[in-house]
Image (spheres, coloured by chain):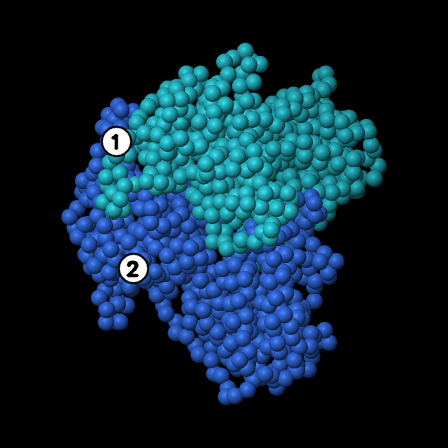
Chain colours: A cyan, B blue
């Protein structure tokens, strides 16, 4: 029976950076080759970066991507590379069916593309496998750009083993191509992915791989990308599972990594069809066997925290920012954001500005100072009183009265937004906003005020998880023998926006322990208000919360991007109309 | 040969307003019935409003919509109603195929819905026809929610004629179901639509109808909705075309209208299959024949202007606003927006605020005053100097120097944004922003400054079209014997942001006559920079413009919604990643 040395190249590509991605692919390929690998797998669409979105509508982009694919192919030797790319479909090919809704070229509609795994060796492209299952739900719009693969399965003989290839979603359904590939004789499936992180996804992936192995009897090499791309963050978690279902090797999460393992096959290839692309009949393996390492499972809070760090770091780095500025109120949200920013960028690249108003408490100022000292960041303090007074006078003229109530609260928040943006314009530091998902959901924020900025680090983190992540981060520091970055006072005091005397969040919102479960049921699981009541939530509370969420849609539409960490973030994940009069009645 | 009296009910539904939409449908149906119609057609998804987007992921919403559909059916008599709705698919039905990428229920993925035309009469549902071609390009995401209809065509005998039904996109392709429906024996096709307005769409629709009639020999009743829904606006343009291709009747654009016409059929029904739903064998027609009116074609500028008026009016009305506030600079953009607002809401509901800074010219103030007088709106004036000075002092502390350059320009713009938002918070008036598409494209605007507000009326209007629409509106006033609303000085003077001494737009941007064609080619037609140069544009200019567009993506992501009037607006139409390093080189 054959044995193979396989590699999963868990890389961090950048959308549109064709040359950079090519170089990264070639460097990981060279390393795999040097280590005696028979094949190295790269993530889905890794040559152009994932997701390229409407760049795919540009003919020039497709031509340039195609040229880069040929360059990678030309550089291959006897070690096989499996690279994710995009190709225009030859409509005469039996391998790719026309979609049911295709308009003819020139009549509008989508171009005719396939999301492919390209198998290359010996300086050329030896096979192309198109993705068959195109996700068009949640954050995914793949039927906007791609046609599904169809027809017979392409198999390859590599190092003597019969190998099939799938692209991401293909592996997630028992109805996908894995079963057919195995039936045709493959003993190994290469699965190339760009599968975004969300809480719990890690275990889900392991489960899916187990199911496919037990259904097919084939071993699986699963490769996924790492890094942030706008709102998405990818954790990697690349794996090699043998044909008995044993996890031989797993990459550490959120870092680039070349995962190598030796695979022995226990089945037999007697019934292989003759439609196999012959690449190599013997393995390139040499030297001592490579066992492969299984990276530790870090736990949900650690994963979520790391997702926020990497998502923030990559958004800045890939968009040309090195420095960030944050308004530090002494509250828990800005405290967590500053801590994440320091972990992502280094203390020297994070600048805090404290902007007290006439309503700010002394402990807010001292908590912000304590935080800055623990993090080792510079903290400036600017009183907003002068601007507050100036606007009070200017507004009195047109409003005919003193500014008060919500108007005055929003005003203070916006004056801080103006200050931060001016600092950003002058220094080139990006403003990180500090709103959490519970605020985002209920509209408990000021448009152009506390929500003003370039990146909303914790916009998908519910308030109760904000507390958990702060505790996690402090515990980690203690384990590392370091000073906990987050002042205990910040965790202990009741949350407040401090925009009027003695204000507390609970004056305007239900306690977060009650609010967050309702928000999750309404936003992430799409229950309606009557259904929430039937599930046992308090009708008065449900009506209030649902109304807050529905009427805040216009605010969310103007929020900066931020890291998606739940199964449904605001943004591409949840496409709610702003104009929406659906308000089903709760019967009591 | 049979003859029929047909009606197209061009209504303005609201997304989620199930009861309101039901009542509107029943009232138009009663009118059609009273006028002796055999059938009344309503737009696509008119019961729930179009597009309902992710409301379709809520089981409760689907149940409530279904219940409302049954209520409408129960109210029908012998006049047939064809109503657009959504139904869950019975997966055992041969009429609806499982999609290739379906995950099984419980495995995630999309619910199993169909976008349907429901044929009802005599108090019940007599047939359901599912949309077969599901657009998943441009602003459309229909494959996110719906399965395509498949299998044999449903035909109905109504008033003795054989009738088939299509839903929107179905009619737009020669590969769609129209040909098959006619082949099976239909002499009339009912096409129910929710087809958004864009410039030129009017003629395109007429052309498509002509093609389908000449291919099929069937008459067509085409019904489309009117009104605004978030960024989309629908112009209606409902039509009745007979089986000779003659346009018998057309509704006026942008208003609700019941279009009635009598249709005589010249073909024969000999070859009708026996799979016809029998509804009525004789016509309900009575009284003198109804010839039907063909509404005038208004011309492109009139259409664009009316689209902006209706889109603005409906966004406010459907979201519960009656009043608007606009910062009036005396420039052409805010002038056009104020004029549109007055046409949409009435002068008494529009409030202007002039906010001069130390750099504002005298003519700006007088032009704003002249405009307000012509429009009959209240104009307040607030100098921003006090706040400008206050922020200068506050910022000097953290920046270590006087505020200057771009930071100072953005600061002034943001101070105005803060004032307008405070006015909005205090009075409940929505802020209408005044940026045009050329500014949106190049990022020539201040985030949270001039772009701050609830609705961006002209965000999809290129600057050169802004001038055209101003001239059009003045000419219309002259024809109507009224005072032209727009001061000629505003049209004649060179555009300026007036954020520093003697500033002109052309200091920062190419002349709009050169800029707009490059923007259209880059944004609407997806050419790359090298392709633009090959098309004959100046390489230096192309490089500069393309770079501006690419680096402004983050700003556009935080813009308020506004009316889409071109074939590709920023927003759902153009899904560009913010993080995007694709910068193809121009070779010279």
- Mark 2 chain: B
Q: Residues within 10 Å of mark 1 (few under 14, many from 20)?
A: some
Which residue carries the number 1 mark?
A: A386
- Does residue B148 sit above or below A442 in this rendering? below
| Figure quadrant of residue B457 | bottom left
Would residue B142 appear left or right of A368 to someone viewing this image?
right
Name the residue nearer the viewer: A32 or A527.
A527
Furthest residue to the front?
A588
Q: Is residue B163 visible?
A: no
Name the residue nearer the viewer: B347 or A56.
B347
Secondary structure under badge 1? Answer: helix
- Mark 1 chain: A
- Does residue B88 sit above or below A212 in this rendering? below
Q: How many marks?
A: 2
Would residue A112 appear left or right of B103 to someone viewing this image?
left
Name the residue nearer the viewer: B166 or B63.
B63
Q: Is disc 1 in contact with disc 2, using a CB cutoff of under 8 Å?
A: no
Where in the figure is residue A138, as x and y percent of width and height? 58, 44
Q: Who's the residue at 38% across and 51% down the image?
A: B455
Q: Are marks 1 and 2 on the same chain?
A: no
Secondary structure under badge 2? Answer: helix
Where in the figure is residue B332, as x and y percent of width and height? 26, 53
Where in the figure is residue B475, as x and y percent of width and height? 26, 67
Q: Is residue A457 visible?
A: yes
- Does residue B311 sit above or below A219 in this rendering? below
| Figure quadrant of residue B160 | bottom right
Which residue carries the number 2 mark?
A: B348
Q: Who's the residue at 22% across and 66% down the image?
A: B483
């Amino acid at each position: 029976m054959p044995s193979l040395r396989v590699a999963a190249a868990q890389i961090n590509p950048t959308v549109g950076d064709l040359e950079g991605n090519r170089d990264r692919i070639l460097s990981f390929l060279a390393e795999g080759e040097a280590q005696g690998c028979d094949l190295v797998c790269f993530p889905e669409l890794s040559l152009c970066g994932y997701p390229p979105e409407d760049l795919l509508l540009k003919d020039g982009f497709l031509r340039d991507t195609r040229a880069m694919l040929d360059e990678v192919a030309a550089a291959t030797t006897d070690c096989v590379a499996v690279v994710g790319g995009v190709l225009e479909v030859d409509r005469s090919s039996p391998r790719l069916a026309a979609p049911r809704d295709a308009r003819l070229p020139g009549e509008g509609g989508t171009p005719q593309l396939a999301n492919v795994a390209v198998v290359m060796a010996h300086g050329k492209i030896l096979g192309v496998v198109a993705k068959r299952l195109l996700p068009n739900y949640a954050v995914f719009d793949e039927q906007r750009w791609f046609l599904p693969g169809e027809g017979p399965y392409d198999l390859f003989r590599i190092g003597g083993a019969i190998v099939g290839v799938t692209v991401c979603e293909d592996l997630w359904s028992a109805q996908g191509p894995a079963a057919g590939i195995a039936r045709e004789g493959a003993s190994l499936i290469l699965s190339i992915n760009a599968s975004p992180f969300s809480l719990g996804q890690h275990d889900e992936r392991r489960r899916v791989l187990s199911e496919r192995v037990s259904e097919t009897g084939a071993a699986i090499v699963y490769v996924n990308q790492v890094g942030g791309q706008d709102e998405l963050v990818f954790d990697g978690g690349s794996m090699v599972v043998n044909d008995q279902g044993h996890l031989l090797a797993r990459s550490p999460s959120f870092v680039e990594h070349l995962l190598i393992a030796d695979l022995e096959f226990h089945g037999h290839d007697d019934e292989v069809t003759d439609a196999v692309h012959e690449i190599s009949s013997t393995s390139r393996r040499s030297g001592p066997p490579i066992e492969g390492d299984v990276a530790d499972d870090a736990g949900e809070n650690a994963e979520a925290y790391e997702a926020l760090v990497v998502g923030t770091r990559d958004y800045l780095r890939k968009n040309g920012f090195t420095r960030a500025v944050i308004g530090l109120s002494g509250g828990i949200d800005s405290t967590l954001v500053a801590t994440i920013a320091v972990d992502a960028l280094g203390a020297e690249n994070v600048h805090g500005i404290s902007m007290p108003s006439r309503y700010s408490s002394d402990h807010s100022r001292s908590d912000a100072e304590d935080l800055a000292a623990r993090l080792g960041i510079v903290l400036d303090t600017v009183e907003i009183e002068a601007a507050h007074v100036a606007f009070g006078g200017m507004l009195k003229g047109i409003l005919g009265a003193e500014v008060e109530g919500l108007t005055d609260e929003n005003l203070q928040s916006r004056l801080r937004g103006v200050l931060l943006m001016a600092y950003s314009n002058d220094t080139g530091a990006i403003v990180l906003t500090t709103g959490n998902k519970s605020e985002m959901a209920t509209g408990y924020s000021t448009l152009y005020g506390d929500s003003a900025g370039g990146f909303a680090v914790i916009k998908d983190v519910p308030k109760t998880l904000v507390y958990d992540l702060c505790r996690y981060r402090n515990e980690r520091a203690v384990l590392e023998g370091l000073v906990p970055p987050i002042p205990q006072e910040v965790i202990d005091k009741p949350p407040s926006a401090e925009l009027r005397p003695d204000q507390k969040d609970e004056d305007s919102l239900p306690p977060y322990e009650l609010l967050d479960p309702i928000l999750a049921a309404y936003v992430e699981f799409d229950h309606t208000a009557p259904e929430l009541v039937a599930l046992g939530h308090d009708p008065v509370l449900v009506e209030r919360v649902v109304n807050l969420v529905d009427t805040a849609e216009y605010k969310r539409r103007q929020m900066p991007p931020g890291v998606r960490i739940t199964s449904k973030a605001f943004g591409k994940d949840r496409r709610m109309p702003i104009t929406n009069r659906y308000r089903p009645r709760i019967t009591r």
